[in-house]
């Protein structure tokens, strides 16, 4: 099983950690974060707002939800502020930059070695889990998903563009950490740190973009944060 | 200190190219990840044109999104990158690099006064067949359009047969041209400018003075077409 432990560089100054999603398209690093802490991120950019759509992201009629009922730092009673895909065909897509040699070469300038793995982690929930067109994905050019974690109404699954699928745990509506650990051969996926299986890593379609979306069916999705890490 | 090592517990890495003109540091990055960088700054967009860059507008520069590479593979490449499709185009950074004051600001982060300025970038010449000093990558004045003209601190160009490092007084032939992606590097230190392709030295020319500070310049002349995935400039 692939280890989810991220080998961080020996430096301690946090260089290479791009915590501002507005800089994903223009800044080098080995780790990229987005935290859905306020609706201004997904309000259209204008004279009074610094929305992500002015920085290489696109989104449609997405909404933001402020949490209000969680217990203090508790994993037992969770209500995060989050990106809320609560309608059909809602999506947010980042710049298409991840998974290529050149991007990893830039990451190597911070890591001190050439990375061979990309790990993607979301903290998310599926408030409704009925159909199979909603999830967290790495999106290739066009309308397809390179790698997608979704629900078929019974189980969570990982799919690729072939399409191949790997069946995971039974669905629920709880908050989980979802991971993909991608290397040149296989993509292993995890829920709350537990391996769910692997698929063969697709070829000839990188770089890809971070994407969360709902389709035309009943499934809904909430995402509190996401990070992508080269190691 | 090697190029891959950083001083511990210090800042000074300017990862946002929109801050090159206003922030001190010892290392400056630009990644060409989305066309919004090249969309003119306005109410609905934060283009580089509002942050001290010239030519960073859709009319003269664009971004091609990659789509067909293998995962992290150097054998099957297709980066998202800066491209230009027309003639006599240029994109240039703020004019800040290579002066004593900028080096002294970098020293506040490095812990020593730097003596070397390095430009490293991942790029290719998708067309390299012409003998052109007006297409390439290097340091120049904000108005420079030819790496052999006054104000050029040196740039990598093609003569139609070989890649070359050209400056006002310098002219050094390197490897035979191709259209493949390479890791390129130019180092200015003391009285010498040395250049590298994929970490192999290609030779040196004499460093020119009375021209600093300079701008990082991406130039497209008549025929040749440089493309760039990312670039970094750093003092050491």
Image: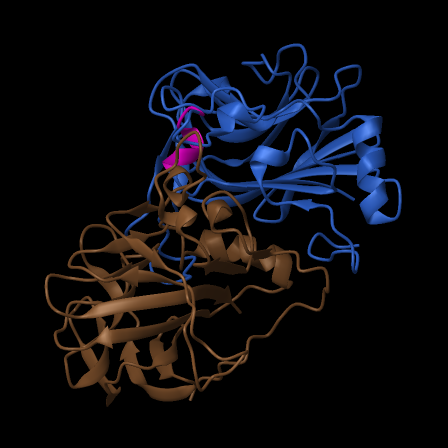
Chain colours: A brown, B blue
Q: Does the magenta stretch include residue B40?
A: yes
Q: In this view, does B110 lie above or below A31?
A: above
Count of all numbered marks drawn on residues in the image: 0
Horizontal arrangement in the rendering, residue A154 relative to residue A110 (left or right): left
Query: Residue placed farthest to the front in the image?
Result: A69
Give the x, y percent position of residue A78. 42, 78
Q: Which residue is drawn at 25% across and 55% down?
A: A91
Q: Residue at x 27, y 53 (%)?
A: A62
Q: In this view, does B42 lie above or below A69?
A: above
Give the x, y percent position of residue A60. 24, 47
**Nearer the observer, A215 or B104:** A215
**Nearer the observer, B37 or A116:** B37
**Nearer the observer, B81 or B200:** B81
Q: In which quarter of the image is residue B93?
A: top right
- Considering the image in quadrants, where does the N terminus of chain A appear? bottom left
Give the x, y percent position of residue A68. 43, 69
Give the x, y percent position of residue A191. 36, 83
Q: Report if residue B110 is visible in the image.
A: yes
Q: In which quarter of the image is residue B103?
A: top right
Q: Report if residue A95 is visible in the image.
A: no
Q: Residue at x 44, y 65 (%)?
A: A225
Q: Is residue A144 magenta?
A: no
Q: Is residue B143 above or below residue A228?
A: above
Q: Please provide the residue range marked out in magenta.
A: B35-41
Horizontal arrangement in the rendering, residue A189 relative to residue A15 (left or right): left
Horizontal arrangement in the rendering, residue B92 relative to residue A51 (left or right): right
């Amino acid at each position: 099983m692939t280890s989810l432990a991220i080998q961080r560089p020996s430096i301690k100054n946090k260089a290479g950690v791009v915590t501002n999603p507005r800089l994903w398209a223009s800044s080098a690093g080995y780790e990229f974060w987005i935290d859905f802490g306020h609706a201004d991120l997904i309000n259209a950019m204008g004279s009074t707002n610094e929305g992500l759509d002015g920085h290489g992201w696109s989104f449609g009629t997405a909404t933001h939800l402020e949490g209000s009922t969680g217990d203090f730092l508790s994993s037992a009673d969770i209500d995060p502020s989050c990106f809320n895909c609560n309608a059909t065909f809602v999506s947010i897509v980042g710049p298409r930059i991840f998974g290529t040699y050149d991007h990893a070469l830039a990451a190597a300038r911070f890591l001190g070695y050439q990375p061979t793995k990309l790990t993607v982690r979301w903290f998310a929930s599926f408030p409704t889990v009925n159909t199979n067109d909603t999830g967290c994905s790495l999106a290739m050019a066009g309308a397809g998903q390179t790698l997608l974690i979704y629900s078929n109404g019974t189980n969570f699954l990982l799919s690729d563009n072939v399409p191949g699928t790997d069946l995971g745990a039974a669905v629920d509506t709880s908050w989980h950490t979802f991971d993909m650990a991608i290397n040149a051969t296989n993509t292993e996926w995890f829920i709350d740190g537990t391996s769910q299986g692997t698929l063969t890593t697709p070829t000839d379609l990188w770089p890809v973009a971070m994407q969360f979306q709902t389709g035309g069916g009943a499934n809904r999705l909430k995402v509190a944060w996401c990070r992508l890490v080269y190691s | 200190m090697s190029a891959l090592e950083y001083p511990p517990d210090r800042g000074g890495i300017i990862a946002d190219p929109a801050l090159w003109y206003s922030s001190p540091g010892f290392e400056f990055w630009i990644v060409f990840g989305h066309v919004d960088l090249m969309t003119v700054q306005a109410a609905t967009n934060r283009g580089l044109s509002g942050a001290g860059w010239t030519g960073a507008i859709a009319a003269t520069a664009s971004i091609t999104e990659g789509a067909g590479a293998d995962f992290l593979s150097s054998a099957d490449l297709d980066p998202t990158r800066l491209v230009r499709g027309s003639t006599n185009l240029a994109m240039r950074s703020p004019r800040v690099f290579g002066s004593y004051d900028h080096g002294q600001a970098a020293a506040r982060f490095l812990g020593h006064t730097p003596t070397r300025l390095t430009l490293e970038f991942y790029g290719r010449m998708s067309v390299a067949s012409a003998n052109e000093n007006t297409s390439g990558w290097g340091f120049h004045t904000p108005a420079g359009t030819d790496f052999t003209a006054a104000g050029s601190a040196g740039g990598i160009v093609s003569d139609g047969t070989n890649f070359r490092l050209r400056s006002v007084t310098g002219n050094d032939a390197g490897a035979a041209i191709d259209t493949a992606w390479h890791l390129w590097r130019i180092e200015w230190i003391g009285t010498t400018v040395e250049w590298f392709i994929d970490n192999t030295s290609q030779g040196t020319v004499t460093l020119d003075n009375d021209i600093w500070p300079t701008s990082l310049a991406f130039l497209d002349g008549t025929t040749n077409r440089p493309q760039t995935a990312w670039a970094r400039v750093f003092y050491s």
